[in-house]
Image: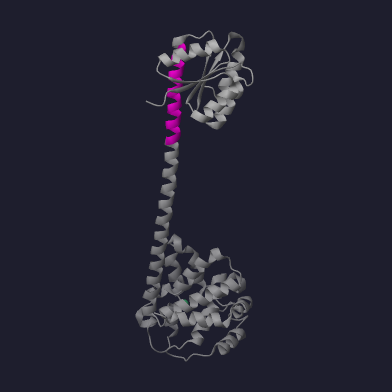
Amino acid sequence: MAQRDILIVDDDRQVREVLHQIFMSAGYNCLLANDGREAVEVFRAGRPPLIVTDLKMPVMTGIELLQQVRALDGDVAVIVLTGATDVKTAIESLKLGAYDFIMKPVNVDELLIAADRAFERRQLLIERREYHELLERRVVEATRDLASAYRQLQETYHATLEALGSALDTRDVGTEAHSRRVHGYALATAREHRVPEADLIDLAHGVLLHDIGKIGIPDAILLKRGPLTPEEWQIMRRHPEIGKALIEKIPFLRGAVPIVFSHHEKWDGTGYPRGLRGEDIPLGARIFMIVDAFDAMTFDRPYSTAKPFDVAKAEIKRCAGTHFDPAVVESFFRVPEPLLAEIRRRSLEP
Ligand SMILES: [Fe+2]
């Protein structure tokens, strides 16, 4: 059984006593107040769940009392007592949140039924609110679970990407260290070029996967020692399209498509597969071209020895406006050399 405290408020001592008797006989634990202000004090101290109050009282009317206690506790049940002349005020009190009104002179049965109903209704309202709160908590928990599942999925994707990248590395002349360096140089250049942070993840994916289409190139061509024939070149040059077709079906990787598809386009329109020109070439691809060339020149490869940074930079400057976007070249040159050296050093760590 819920707490059966009741606060009786009436300025008429006789009425108060009668109400006290009625409720006490019905098993309620009664608190008494002879005006609104006193009632607020008693309510603050004991928080009875039910108040039965007269409307017309000195110091504070029943309506004011109703407003004050409901401000303190929205769950409090209030029943007002009203004379026949004051029905309008009683109806007003219902609008302000009173549960019920009882006409004077009071009928005992009617009063006790009203009190019981008020308790029940209050209980239902509390349970309904608690149920809603529970639902809300569940939603918060479910959202949190979803966020963690999404994070896991992202991690899985990332691992998949790295696996795809290294699968490529084992087939091609490139290495994982090369991927790491180009990735690092590309991000540093993108930041100098004020590429929004939100776009960097697509850039990273694109850099890592730029040659993914080589999976579709036969070994005899991909791993051929010595120069390719024109027909073999034709096949080799299909790798951007193959790569695009591979990853554009994966929503998470769709942002990498522009780099994968356009990483052999040149600023002056002499690249492939589409012969795009200038800023028609996606920015990520323009960044990639420069840092990939830089790494190719500054790192030993089977067919060439490494050039110093400044020699490689001079070569890149020479090709600004033909192969490379001059503005991105400027951004790349703003990347501090110690940072380039650090990226290079870290790429060789196990
Ligand atoms: Fe390529």
Q: Is residue 77 above or below residue 192?
A: above
Count of numbered marks:
0
Q: Position of residue 215 (x, y in %)?
A: 38, 74
- Residue 112: in magenta span: yes
- Please identify the quadrant where the N terminus is shown: top left
Q: Say which residue appears at 59% left-offset and 26% top-offset.
A: 67
Q: Residue furthest bottom?
A: 305
Residue interval drawn in magenta: 110-130
Q: Nearer the viewer, residue 164 or 76?
A: 76
Q: Position of residue 292 (x, y in %)?
A: 51, 80
Q: Nearer the viewer, residue 39 or 182?
A: 39
Please indicate whether residue 4 sits to the left or right of residue 41 in the image: left
- Please identify the quadrant where the C terminus is shown: bottom left
Q: Say which residue appears at 45% left-offset and 13% top-offset.
A: 21
Q: Position of residue 93 (x, y in %)?
A: 58, 20
Q: Nearer the viewer, residue 128 or 226?
A: 128
Q: Quadrant of residue 87?
A: top right
Q: Main secondary structure of the magenta part?
A: helix
Q: How is the image coloured?
A: one colour
Is residue 39 something one can see in this rendering? yes
Is residue 96 something one can see in this rendering? no
Q: Is residue 114 above or below residue 326?
A: above
Q: Position of residue 347 (x, y in %)?
A: 45, 80
